[in-house]
Structure formats: structure tokens, C-alpha cells
Amino acid sequence: MSGPRAQEPASFAQRLRDRERLVGYWIALNDPAATERIAGLGYDYLGVDGQHGVMHQPGWQAAMLAVDARGRSAGIIRVPSPDPVAIGVALDTGARGVVVPMVETPEQARTVVRACRHHPAGTRSLAGPVRAGLRLGDVPAEIDDQVACIVMIETAAALENLDAICATEGLDAVYVGPADLSAALGARWFGDPAAADALEAALVRVTDAAGRAGIACGIHVLDGESAAKRLAEGFTFATVSSDITHLQQAAARHLTAAGGHLAA
């Protein structure tokens, strides 16, 4: 593994591939002004949630513009599904990577990788004079070098096929969705103690498999302390909570401090 290098958005994909320790933040709100503020804090990347957040395709480009305005963090997008069309739309906004949910087989992983790469390595269409070309250039191979392809491990089938998924040529990283993965392991809700041991064992399996394959391995966490813990355990990148979660938490904390009572 190489040593840390100066943080800049253009280096994100290579830093990820080099398994450097990266910390990101999750964007669920469709508010470019708020995203721009967070983009200046120094996170290595901001992950925009196009699957479960309130932001859908029309907001993806505005979010990438907001991230780029500060020139510090890389903007990546979680697409709604492994659909190559959605992946292409996300990358055409100038995103420096995609996070693809519900990938369960090596065949799906190969399809996803090909959707992230231009001919001859893949099936991605050249974007032309839009944001991707403006930010990443117009040489297909050079664009591909700057785009990270990340698939999520969050189902029982994905765990069963873990080694084969990690061995997919061109895949840059796997990323654990702990809520869905814990449900797949029998949890009745995220944080259910009955599934805690099974989840921890699964996380070790994921970090070990990624390590054997020489690819990066990430996880979503609830706070910065948890990010530090997971990075120390072998994950190479971790994404902290979300803007909408922290907005509610901060508002609740101030209400309590002011002597108010939280609604049941």
C-alpha cells in the first residue's frame, strides 16, 4: 500500500485502488447549498444517495456541481440498482465513482464493471461535451482510470458469492450495507443484538475476501468513532451517517438543551 498523498478529487479512484484509508460522508437531502457546505469540510468523498435518499436523477448533477464547487471532496453516487443505464447517467454527471446496490453474483458484478468502462473494456457510452467530459477529459481510457466501480455486499447471496465477486476483473471495491446485511443474517431491525455476532463474523469475511483480492473494502457507519473502529479492523474506507440524520440529531439536542421535550 502506498503512503497518503495530497487530497484532491481527481486522485480519489487511484487512492481507493491503492487501499488508502478514506473517510466519506453521506448525502441524502436534495439541497445543493447544504451539500456545498459539507463538501468544504475535508472528507475524501461525498456519497450521494440515489437509491434511498430523497434525491433522484434530476438532483444528481446539482449535487456533483455543489461538491465540485469546493474542490476538496470527490463526488460519488449510489445508483438505484445494477442497471447499466442508471450507472451511465450517474457517471455522465461527472461523478468520480458509483456505488451499486444489491449485487449478488459475479455475473452482475461483471455487468456493473463493464457499465463503468468504455470500449473495449466495457459498454459505457461516451458522454460528449457534458459534465463528465468537462471534469474527467475526453479520452475514454483516461476517464475510466478516474472512475471508481464499487458494488455493495448486503445480501445472503452476495456473502455466498463473496470471493467470486471480489475477484471480478476491474472491480475497485466492495462496500457493506450493514442494515440490509444484518437483516439477511436474521436481524429483526438494524442493531438487533440477536444478529450482532453473525454480522461481525460476516464483516470479517468481507474484509478478508477483499484483502485476498487486493481491492478496497468499505462500510457505512453511524458516526466518526465507528468509522475509526472499522478502519482499524481492516476496512479501507468508511462513510459517516448522513446529512438528514445529523440535522435531526442536532435539532433534537438543541431542543433538549433549551428545556423542551422531544415528541414521542
Image (tube, rainbow, N blue to C red):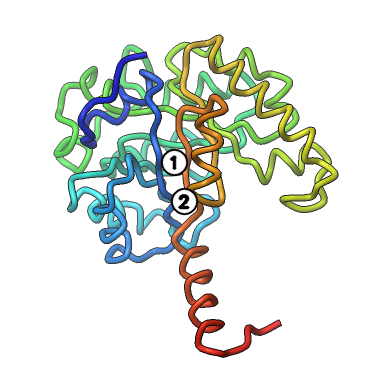
Horizontal placement of 59 versus 110: left or right? left
| Image: 159 above or below 70 | above
Which residue lies under the disc numbered 1?
Answer: 86
Q: Earlier in the sequence, mark 2 or mark 1?
A: 2
Number of numbered callouts drawn: 2
Task: Kindly state the secondary structure of the residue where label 1 is placed.
Answer: helix
Residue kind at label 2, given as amino acid type: Gly
Residue kind at label 1, given as amino acid type: Ala
Horizontal placement of 207 versus 130: left or right? right
Horizontal placement of 74 versus 202: left or right? left
Q: Residue at x 37, y 28 (%)?
A: 148
Q: Residue at x 39, y 64 (%)?
A: 30
Asked if the residue under mark 1 is in contact with the one under mark 2, i.e. CB atoms within 8 Å, the reply is: yes
Percent across and percent down for residue 86 are 44, 41
Percent across and percent down for residue 99 are 47, 37
Task: Kindly state the secondary structure of the residue where label 2 is placed.
Answer: loop
Which residue lies under the disc numbered 2?
Answer: 50
Q: Residue at x 23, y 34 (%)?
A: 7
Which of the image's four quarters has the N terminus? Answer: top left
Q: Which of 107 and 67 lies nearest the eye of the viewer?
A: 67
Percent across and percent down for residue 220 are 54, 43
Tell me the mark number nearer the camera, choosing from 2 and 1.
2
Q: Which of 199 and 257 lies nearest the eye of the viewer?
A: 257
Label annotation for residue 27:
none
Label 2 crowding class (10 Å Cα cut-off): few <14, some 14-19, many 20+? many
- Quarter of the rendering containing residue 162: top right
Which of the image's four quarters has the C terminus? Answer: bottom right
Label 1 crowding class (10 Å Cα cut-off): few <14, some 14-19, many 20+? some
